[in-house]
Image: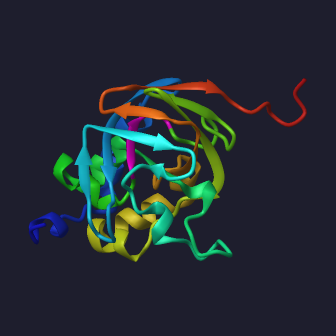
Amino acid sequence: MSETLFDLHLSNAEIEAGIDDVLAAPNTEGRLEMIVRRPAVNAREVIKEAELDREQGLIGDNWLTRGSSRTENGLGHPEMQLNVMNYRFAELIAGSRERVPLAGDQLFVDLDLSGANLPPGTRLKVGDAVIEVTAIPHTGCKKFVERFGLDAMKFANSEFGRRHNLRGINAKVIEPGGVRTGDAVVVTSRPLAVGSS
């Protein structure tokens, strides 16, 4: 990727100016805007369709072999199979669709990912597959700062950003199946609130 793809960093004020559009994302039925496969560290492939698998996550992605410090066997954490990010926020901080894959997530959706809308245990139908939101938080890393700037990282990891899961959410595959760019992303169930009957 060219240097210019890494050079665009928005200020906090510029992010705030675009946040209303991000918060206007639908909350029950959205759309799969982009699928990104990561065949190797720092490698990105924008693909039009993919297969989601219970054991391997997104087929061809390096989630499982890249591993996790959270697992005893060193393989990918089963509760972190898929990284899902709000496409509107990703495009806002990226500045263009071409830079969105730099975020490192696999599924970019036009959907409200806030904890109030999609608490852990929420299930989403994406194409032919069903995925479930997991409880492990998805947070930004050093690479996120390098690609999108310190202000973007601070905004995503602020109390406001965490409440709206602007950095994204983790999910796992419940029912395998094919997904395609443009597929509907539909909330099929949410966990019952504590104390509800």
Q: Where residue 31 sits in the image (x, y, percent)?
A: 38, 28
Work out which quarter of the rendered image holds the N terminus and state it: bottom left
Which of the two residues, 39 or 95, is positioned nearer the viewer here?
39
Q: Is residue 110 magenta?
A: yes
Residue under the point 52% across and 71% down: 67
Q: Where residue 140 sits in the image (x, y, percent)?
A: 45, 66
- Give the magenta-colored segment's residue range: 106-112
Q: Is residue 81 magenta?
A: no
Which of the two residues, 109 or 177, is positioned nearer the viewer here?
177
The quadrant in which residue 77 appears is: bottom right
Residue under the point 61% across and 43% down: 133
Residue under the point 31% across and 27% down: 182
Can residue 73 be seen in this snapshot? yes
Which of the two residues, 12 or 61, is positioned nearer the viewer here?
61
Can residue 111 be seen in this snapshot? no
Q: How is the image coloured?
A: rainbow
Q: Where residue 115 sits in the image (x, y, percent)?
A: 62, 43
* In the image: residue 138, left or right of residue 127: right
188 shown above or below 3 = above
* In the image: residue 99, left or right of residue 41: left
82 shown above or below 41 = above
Q: Where residue 193 sits in the image (x, y, percent)?
A: 80, 33
Work out which quarter of the rendered image holds the C terminus and state it: top right
* In the image: residue 194, left or right of residue 133: right
70 shown above or below 88 = below
